[in-house]
Image (cartoon, rainbow, N blue to C red):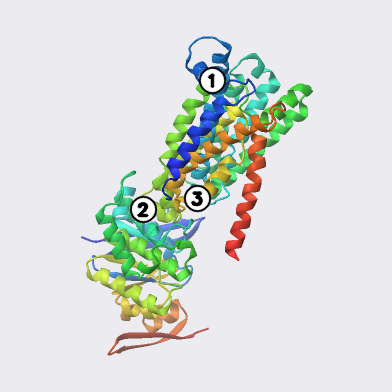
Amino acid sequence: MKRGLLPGLGLAIVLLFAASLLIGPAQLSIADSLSGLMAGDDSPVALVMREIRLPRALLALLIGASLGLAGAAMQGYLRNPLAEPGLIGVSASAALGAVIAIQSGFAAAFVLGLPLAALAGALAAVLLVMALAGPGGTSLTLILAGIAVSALASALTSLVLNLSPNPFAASEIVFWMMGSLEDRSMIHVWIALPFMALGLLLLGTLGRGLDALTLGEDAAQAMGIQVSRLRLQLVFGTACVVGAGTAVAGAIGFVGLVVPHILRPFVGAHPSRLLWASALGGAVMVLTADIATRVILPDRDLKLGVLTALVGAPLFLHLILKLRKERL
Amino acid sequence: MNALSLSGLSVTLQRRTVLRDVSFDIKPGEFVGLIGANGAGKTTLMRAILGLQAHQGHSSLAQLPQNARAGQAAWMPQMREIAWPITVESVVMLGRTPHLSALQKPSADDTEHVEAALARMELTAMRHRPATQLSGGEQARVLIARALAQDTPLLLADEPIAGLDPAHQIATMQTFAELAHQGKSLLVSLHDLGLAARHCSRLILLDNGSVAADGRPEDVLSAERLAAVFGITAWCEHTEQGLVYQPLDVIR
């Protein structure tokens, strides 16, 4: 591993987290912001800091780290640099749950309605994927099951939009699906946190098995790795972090795909070392992108998911071109 | 005490019997060559022995819990997969996985085994290169070194010398024979009957999922059996340089 990579990423996170707290439409000075954050009173400054900016920064940190870690774990398990956390159908199904909640009015009736419906969607997806892929199946059956569930969830989401009699609900759904951290409160943090902590624990301890899987499933099993247990841990861990992330912020793409890919050369391509480096890298990317949505077009409500995709796609193209040059 | 004992091992895949009632023991110090035509069931047999393949019958290895199994037997699959561009020495260090717990750093003992395996397979000079950038034959040597580093009483390898240059084929067979001398046991599938005859202490001939012959190389490779199983003729002679064995023609 390149020395200084983890401390460097850690330092970047601290700085970006601070920046995320200090940048916003309410033009607060640094001193005001900090005292507002510390003060327990109900002054407007304290409210802005504690109820708007702090949850936003915390969610960016958590979701970024989750997506980065889940992406690295998924790529390591499937031994494919093009794998991403959404592959097992969890994000599409969580989105479906959320869309149904918006359309049915459940989301408007009850503040936790939308995230809970999204989590229910994620849970249904993971159970369906595991039932389809079977307990002893290979990575290929997992991909196929994930694609099937993803496609089904996307089709049902389209169906809800298609049949939606209410154009306002339809536009709300479309905007929600773009992914954003705007106007999230500490309640969202508390909903996501337990799932994410569990998911981070499940995924973060996969390193040894993922390293062994570099040589294939047979070789890994003969080295004492219980591959079917590893797969279960991977699927549930990914479902926890991606389900919780989608539930509170909508679909944020490309982070889980691009971050492990960028960091892989810096950790000597070791799947185990990539796990935590990617978690930190994902947090850096989402914090940066979320700050950028506030700086670039402050009054146009630029969506986070749109920005990560806009930044992620060209980064990916750049990597492909680099790869082609190496092959030639 | 046998290093491995099988009795009545059978495998049925999609209602087709791939292995039928295979029974044999391997003692410490034996270098067993597993030979047979394509599709005879060599890979299936080894995977069943390791418990990687659902089977009927008894394999002393498959009975063990998975962790204990990894301490007893190392396995080099035929598919030479190295998914990520990690360095040669990192690949070889993966062989120490069963000896290390989750967050444990490699000890001096682990490093020693890795060094020995690298030296045996003549990989020391390329130890810092990404394994994925090596040639196919070099990758095979890296994976053999990985299996050696696991340091188990039993080593199973599926066509380990396929694709190696002649010098490395011979050197690898000599390494295996040397390990057998040290009291380890090896079960290695091979297609090169000449090398098998020269280096293995025992051959098991698999035909259509059953053991057609099992014994000393010169006994197993009789002219009638070769004609029946492989459909070939061969020239075989005991010389001053040991048993020389050269397949000649196809009988059709």
Question: Which amino acid type is marked by label 2?
Answer: Met
**Picture coordinates of residue B27, whole percent (x, y):** 24, 65
Report helix, strand or loop for mark 1: helix
Q: In this view of the protein, which residue sits in the foreground, B116 or A91?
A: B116
Task: Say above or below: B64 vs A23.
Answer: below
**Residue A73 appears in the figure:** yes
Q: Amino acid at mark 3?
A: Arg
Of callouts 2 and 1, which one flags the residue occurring earlier in the amino acid sequence? 1
Please give the residue where the numbered disc 2 appears in the rendered image.
Answer: A223
Q: Residue at x 37, y 61 (%)?
A: B21
Q: Earlier in the sequence, mark 2 or mark 3?
A: 2
Marks 2/3 same chain? yes
- Residue B2 quadrant: bottom left
Quadrant that contains the N terminus of chain B = bottom left
Q: Is residue A287 above or below residue B121?
A: above
Pointer 3 chain: A
Mark 3: secondary structure: helix
Chain letter for the residue marked with disc 1 in the picture: A
N-terminal of the pair, mark 3 or mark 1, is: 1
Residue A183 location, x and y as percent? Answer: 62, 21
Question: Which numbered disc covers residue A33?
Answer: 1
How many C-alpha atoms fall within 10 Å of the one at disc 1: few (<14), some, or many (≥20)?
Answer: many
In the foreground, A175 or B202: A175
